[in-house]
Amino acid sequence: MALTGVGKWFAAGQGRVEALRGVSFSVQCGEFVAVVGPSGCGKSTLLRLIAGLLVPSEGEVLVDGAPPGVARAAKRIGYIPQESALLPWRTVLDNVALGLEVNARRSRREAREQAWVQLAVVGLAEFAGRYPYQLSGGMRQRVALARALVIAPRLLLLDEPFAALDELSREAMRYELLALWERVRASALLVTHSIAEAVALADRVLVLSPRPGRVVGEARPELPRPRAPEVERSAAFLAAQAAVRGLLGAR
């Protein structure tokens, strides 16, 4: 995945609001990259551009060498929003199967079989027949992860997926996510307000400026993989957090 000189602005009255300006970076195959920055700097806009949900005002976005819309149609992109966005009238199993039914044109039976396998991977097979309202917030996000991963995407986009969870659940979920990611090693791009989350998950952390968002720096946490919660007590983890905070302060 690569962005070259990407800018995005929106009409506002007689003028426009510039959300992003001149953003260029790439995510290599199997790499996990996080993006942090102040509120309103365009992090979620950036992710929607890569997902093909928005069109850049200038510059170019490519996923596997193709425009995002083409990559999404070919089920190369898995997208996890801030809220789980599960359909309340479908069971957990049918929510996970939906992407296969719609995007991969699988039969309902085949889609449900693959969805059940993915639910087993995230530890929720016994809840396959439940509805979203019957699950905790953390469980709903695990279902959202299963739904994104069941299509075997080449690129996983995560838009603050744990923002709605309490701090303890959020800490636990990031290591569940890492364990799942280690199994598939898709390229991953996370946007988050949490420096700790970015450092715990990513190979590289990109820092955006205030609006219009520009990449103003990069930190590379020197942390071994696979990672466990204990890594957050290490000197290397604290040093990486300090490096990211320094880049945010230097903007």
Image (cartoon, rainbow, N blue to C red):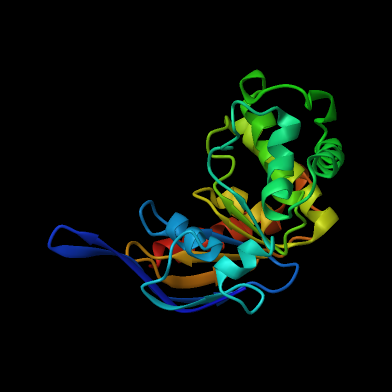
Quadrant into which the N terminus falls = bottom right
Foreground of the two, 115 or 201: 115
> Quick check: 226 above or below 108?
below
Please tell me whether residue 233 is drawn above or below residue 20 in the rendered image: above
Residue in view at x 56 percent, y 74 percent: 67
Res. 232 visible in picture: no
User: What percent of the width, then of the height, locates residue 93?
Assistant: 76, 32
Screen quadrant of the C terminus: bottom left
Q: Is residue 117 left or right of residue 12?
A: right
The image quarter containing residue 126 is top right
Q: Quadrant of residue 183?
A: bottom right
Q: Using the image as rendered, state which of residue 61 and residue 137 is in the foreground.
A: 61
- Residue at 76%, 42% in the rendered image: 176
Q: Which residue occupies the extreme left position in the image?
A: 14
**Residue at 60 percent of width and 34 percent of height:** 86
Tell me where residue 74 appears, x and y as whole percent. 68, 65
- Relative placement, left or right, of 240 versus 146 is left
Note whether residue 242 is visible: yes
* Residue at x-position 82% and y-position 57%: 184
Front-lying residue, 35 or 150: 150
Residue 182, how many percent across, how many down? 82, 55
- Residue 91, given in percent of the width and then of the height, sits at 70, 27
- Most distant residue in the top direction: 134
